[in-house]
Image: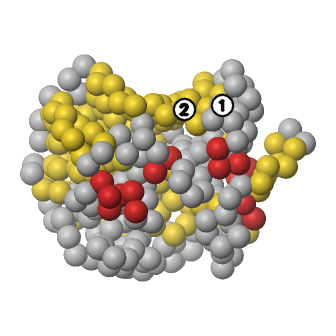
Amino acid sequence: MITKEKFGNYEKYEIAKGDLAVTVTTLGATCISIKFKGKELALTHKTADEYLNGDGFIGAIVGRYANRIKDAKFTLNGKEYILPANEGKNQLHGGPNAFDKRTFKAEEIGDNAVKFTYFSPDGENGYPGNLTAVFTYTVENNAFKIDFEGDTDADTVYAPTTHLYFNLAGGGSILDHEARVLADEYVAVDDESIPTEIKPVDEYFDFRKTRKIKSFIDHSYVLNKSEGDKVCEVSYDGVKMTLEADAPGVQFYTGKFLSGEYKAFEGFAFEPGLYPNSPNRDDFPNATLKAGEHYHKYARFSFESI
């Protein structure tokens, strides 16, 4: 069942089925609530203005390119593109006033899905090509799926993701949540969080066996696909969440720099996508969406009582 309401100057849609209710809004195609058996599992804001004025990307779709681009520039087809920087000299999550601040067009699909569409014109935030970005939330069988799609009329860089933050206890620290990440390697970074090399996971970064989250992590993991598209599992307080995605990597962030309404380590994020700075690294998965090609990736979050 889908219920539509006003959300400030935007609209919000609650998609409910079984024990799961997911609420999404036309502002940033943002997920503003995830309730499983009535318990809120996502970090949320109460008003549209808080999302519009906030800087933590809480619950939003981020893009065109999720994660960091070194020196806010890349070269594509022999041409250099200069992007607006919004994290020091680098660009993060598509830049200032990117997808997370834009108004999307919403369309209800049946009784359990909402499709969001945004037209990003050539040159917006420095990116080439007129791009139509489409993100669809579908709720089914105590899970919700996000389909990430896109089409462009000129070669561009495109790799969006979701920036959901979770807290399976419904509040407080997440440092005792138990996590498993299916990755043998991670992307080491410098002091600006720009990749230096891919390294085997050591004791600090190894989550191949379930263990408690005990420290700061904000790194991309190279998924080993040992269990198909399963990316990770996290459990706490009687709830288990499983993420499946067809991306090559996932950014695992334990929320050290949360501020304002939420304090450090009060939420964790798993952001499936490419590795940081992929547009400038020939040895990383390709970040180019060519004219006439259709982009389609997915992420599926499922929940169960344990």
| Secondary element at image label 1 | loop
Q: Which residue is mark 2?
A: 119
Q: Quadrant of residue 132?
A: top right
Circles 2 and 1: CB distance less than 8 Å? yes
Rendered residue at 33%/68% (across/down): 267
Colouring convention used in this rendered image of the protein: secondary structure
| Location of residue 172 with respect to 238 vertically, above or below | below
Q: Quadrant of residue 120?
A: top right
Closer to us: 223 or 278? 278
| Location of residue 75 with respect to 54 vertically, above or below | above
Point out residue 286 in the picture as x, y percentages from the top left corner.
71, 42
Closer to us: 56 or 220? 56
Rendered residue at 68%/59% (across/down): 84
Closer to us: 13 or 282? 13
Q: Which residue is mark 1?
A: 130
Rendered residue at 65%/73% (across/down): 88
Label 2 sits on what residue type?
A: Phe
Label 1 sits on what residue type?
A: Asn
Question: Looking at the image, can residue 290 be seen?
Answer: yes
Q: Earlier in the sequence, mark 2 or mark 1?
A: 2
Point out residue 14 in the picture as x, y percentages from the top left corner.
20, 39
